Amino acid sequence: MTHSINPTNAYTVPSVSITTARTGASSRANVLGMRVMQERAYAKRGEQYLLIKSPPASGKSRALMFIALDKINNQGLQQAIVVVPERSIGSSFADEPLSQYGFYWDWQVAPQWNLCNAPSVDEPRVAKSKVDAVRKFLASTDKILVCTHATFRFAMEELGIAAFDNRLIAIDEFHHVSSNPNNVLGSQLGALITRDKVHLVAMTGSYFRGDSEAVLSPTDESKFETVTFTYYEQLNGYQWLKSLDIGYFFYTGAYVDAVAKVLNPALKTIVHIPNVNARESLKDKQREVEEIMHGLGEWKGVDTATGFHLVQSRDGRTLKVADLVDDSDPAQRSRVLTALKDSAQKNNRNHIDIIIALGMAKEGFDWIWCEHALTIGYRSSLTEIVQIIGRATRDAEGKERARFTNLIAEPAAEQSAVIEAVNDMLKAISASLLMEQVLAPRYEFTPKNNGQIEGFDYGEGGYKEGGRNVGVNTETGQIHIEINGLATPQSTEATRICKEDLNEVVTSFLQDKTALERGLFDQENTLPEELTQLRMGKIVRERYPDLSNIDQEAIRQHAIAAMNITQQAKLVLAEVNAEDATQGSTALLDGVRKFINVRDLNIDLIDRINPFEAAYSVLAKAMNEKLLRQVQTSIAAKKVGIPEDEARDLAQRALQFKTERNRLPNINSTDAWEVRQAEGVAAFARYRAQTKAAQAQEESSNG
């Protein structure tokens, strides 16, 4: 798999381009009919609590079928209940003749037990009927039920937790769940885990859980066995799809005019228009759909059988367009949805050309021919972006290229709402950086001279003691890198996080507005260590408060190393490709090796690199200089003093400095980071003095 950065025009935020090896491995089935990811998950079928992290289109639905059937037939569980976030995803768990492909049993759901096919749960009367259906299912001898998150929540509230004992509960799109007490489903799952009488299989297409809340508490999360299948493995193992482009573009004026410039009618495309409350919206969703269709060509009517709009394009072709935005006519909407889900048309590339949606066609929506996911406006959830991109990353015969385009309103200099525009831009950059991290191979970091790892190839000459070792697992794409001074996690949980969940930690960092603003636009006044040590350190402590200081520091170092090495490798490749235009993209691994081979890699060096350096280098070239300076000025002006929590963190770093060097940081030092730590000590002392003075005054007043 190869990566490159592709700035194509003014106001282009970093664009990622990935080229795959097309090994066919991820779609190749074993004797039981299981693909690679499914086989990996099935190997863990005996676990009571199982978390499957795997990209869209990797076969999570079928993986669950294999596991559920084994739990029912071999592990003594009474029934399996599959819970999906919305009714449309219920079709992913329709009957499958698995025995035809070598498995022991077929997946069969009796029509009355697929509650996703029943009427909507909007009305209390209908919701109650679905809870009654769940009650009847639990009392029956039938084995499989499919329902929505909402139905399951209502059933848990009415029937009680004990009603689900000795059953498998499978939660699809698990990132919808949250450990926040206000998240009902999250609280119910916590109660199920505490009671410990069910088996749980959780599935998510994202490598991070939501955007601000953890899905599970650390205690509950530690009980889950994790199966991870990466985007790298998924895309590299495809048979047909060989490239994925991810681009973020700013526009001026009405977004419908910009859509006309980037929407190629020759590509199978899903267009997600902005929410009516979004800044980009024209406040008339149906007019927006009509203008998009007008940009495609001349409207010729509606197909009575499918409900698809017929539009004659400029080149004379008749385009079939599905409108999932208009909800004014329930019968028409139902006709369109039914036509889109028609299993007989699944392999027909010409069944539909363009889908225009608002909130639908994201998670679990399976259209293998989709080549372009075009989204207008930023998405508040990075998880949502991963899901939308997943609509275009299905493998299909003859489909060699897929792309994701995010149109963002340009933060123009004369614009009155500059702050809001800058916020949107920061979110777009954040999403771009996250996708680069998600699409990169996973890293296996160890301290210097810790030794080679079995299954990794260290190149010509093999592993060398004291050398700049980079090993590659050609099967999984993992990269082993030795880092001098790297902290080693002590607990089992911290070790698991460093191996499985670094992208979740990086996601939290990328959502930290302060880190983004200062790292990108206030580089003159911000030291890299303030981001890599203070901001990342604070994020790790808040995510994992129960871990020891040693484990927290190990996670921080591993996370910042994963992000900085990916970004520096990307920067190296961009420089190489700029010098030699004929060379084209080289593997990210080459960039990693070039970055490591020009210096002795240690954790102090990694901490001294601004994680946003590579993104800024592209942004500075692509963005109008006047606008860039305006944004930098507005960000720099917001920086005031040293907040108390940051002063405390700096004081703690200063104590570590004293332990290592036998002296406190000197405020007159020539080293800027040492000066900053000294300033933090002084600021923290002032805060403590102010607190003591306030306490003394209060005691005096009370006395």
Image: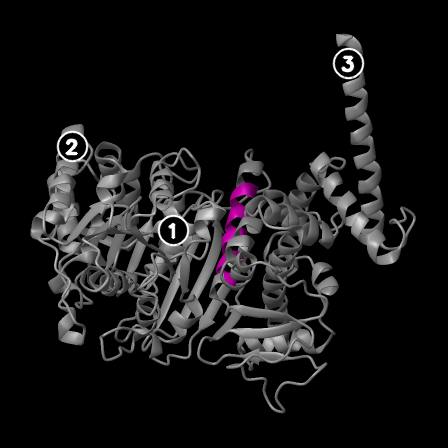
Q: Quadrant of residue 489?
A: bottom right
Characterize the local packing of mark 1: few (<14), some (14-19) or many (20 or more) Cα atoms within 10 angstroms: many
Q: Position of residue 120 (x, y in %)?
A: 17, 38
Give the mark nearest the N terminus, 3 or 2.
2
Answer with left or right where residue 592 lies relative to residue 669: left
Image: 167 above or below 185: below
Q: Nearer the viewer, mark 3 or mark 2?
A: 3
Earlier along the polypeptide chain: callout 3 or callout 1? 1
Foreground residue among 285 and 172: 172
User: Could you tell me which secondary element the residue under label 2 belongs to?
Assistant: helix
Q: Residues within 10 Å of mark 3 (few under 14, many from 20)?
A: few
The quarter holding residue 453 reads bottom right
What quarter of the picture does the C terminus occupy?
top right
Residue 445: image x %, image y %?
60, 69
Foreground pick, 595 / 284: 595
Numbered range of the magenta stretch: 422-437
Q: Which residue lies at the image location 69% right of the left edge and 48% below the top edge?
A: 534
Q: Which residue is mark 2?
A: 128
Q: At numbered mark 3, what does the secondary structure look like: helix, strand or loop?
A: helix
Residue 277 in picture, x, y percent from top left: 39, 34
- Whether residue 628 can be seen here: no
Tell me which amino acid carries mark 2.
Lys
Tag 3 and tag 1, C-beta contact below 8 Å: no
**C-alpha distance separating marks 1 and 2:** 36 Å
Q: What whole-number distance in Å separates the C-alpha atoms at marks 3 and 1? A: 59 Å
**433 drawn magenta:** yes
Residue at image mark 3: 699
In which image quadrant can residue 412 be found? top right
Q: Amino acid at mark 1?
A: Thr
Numbered disc total: 3
* Residue for badge 1: 375
Residue displayed at 85% across by 48% down:
675
